[in-house]
Image (cartoon, rainbow, N blue to C red):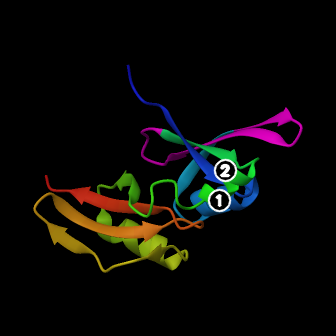
Amino acid sequence: MRQTLTALLVRDYDEAIGFYVGKAGFTLVEDADQGGGKRWVVVRPSGGGAGLLLAKAVSEAQTQRIGDQTGGRVFLFLETDDFTADHARMTGAGVRFLEAPRHEPYGVVAVFEDLYGNRWDLIEPKS
């Protein structure tokens, strides 16, 4: 078995695609109309790995959880082979980092937020 997708609540499909593809450097894998305003939208990091299913919130309970699916903790981890280049590209594209890059025993890391406030680690593991 392997994990292939993680559902991420979003307010709007197109604004989420704009962030993940346009700013974070993901690839749009699929965007299929399912009728009734529902779409199957999958984005994946350009280097591969598990994708995100961008799931538009349809209830008040879901809407309240947009941007805070994990109670303020880092939710997802984006691994890179070149932290410096990816950090600079993402910062230049307008991605908001919450801290300066830091060197930890396991690698270089910095926390960033997506357009809704979900927290991510951008990390280059120690080789």
Residue 20, which numbered label? none
The amino acid beneath tag 2 is Gln
- Give the left or right position of residue 53, taking residue 51 as reference: right
Residue nearer the viewer, 80 or 111: 111
- Give the left or right position of residue 104, taking residue 76 as reference: left
- Which residue is at 89% across, 38% downward? 36
Q: Which part of the image, by quadrant, shows the N terminus?
A: top left
- Which residue is at 59% across, 67% downward? 115
Magenta part, dominant SS: strand
Residue nearer the viewer, 118 or 108: 118
Separation of marks 2 and 1 at Cα, in angstroms: 5 Å
Q: SS class of the residue under badge 2?
A: helix
Does the stretch in magenta take in 43?
A: yes
Residue 62, which numbered label? 2
Picture coordinates of residue 29, whole percent (x, y): 62, 39
Callout 2–callout 1 Cβ contact below 8 Å: yes
- Which residue is at 66% across, 54% downward? 10
Picture coordinates of residue 9, whole percent (x, y): 62, 50
Residue range in magenta is: 31-50
* Residue most extreme to the top: 1
**Residue 75, visible in the rendered structure:** yes
**Residue 21, visible in the rendered structure:** no
Badge 1: few (under 14), some or many (20 or more) residues near its Cα, within 10 Å? few
Where is 93 relative to 116, above or below?
below
Residue nearer the viewer, 82 or 75: 75
Residue 64, which numbered label? 1
Badge 2: few (under 14), some or many (20 or more) residues near its Cα, within 10 Å? some
Picture coordinates of residue 81, whole percent (x, y): 29, 55
Residue nearer the viewer, 95 or 60: 60
The amino acid beneath tag 1 is Gln
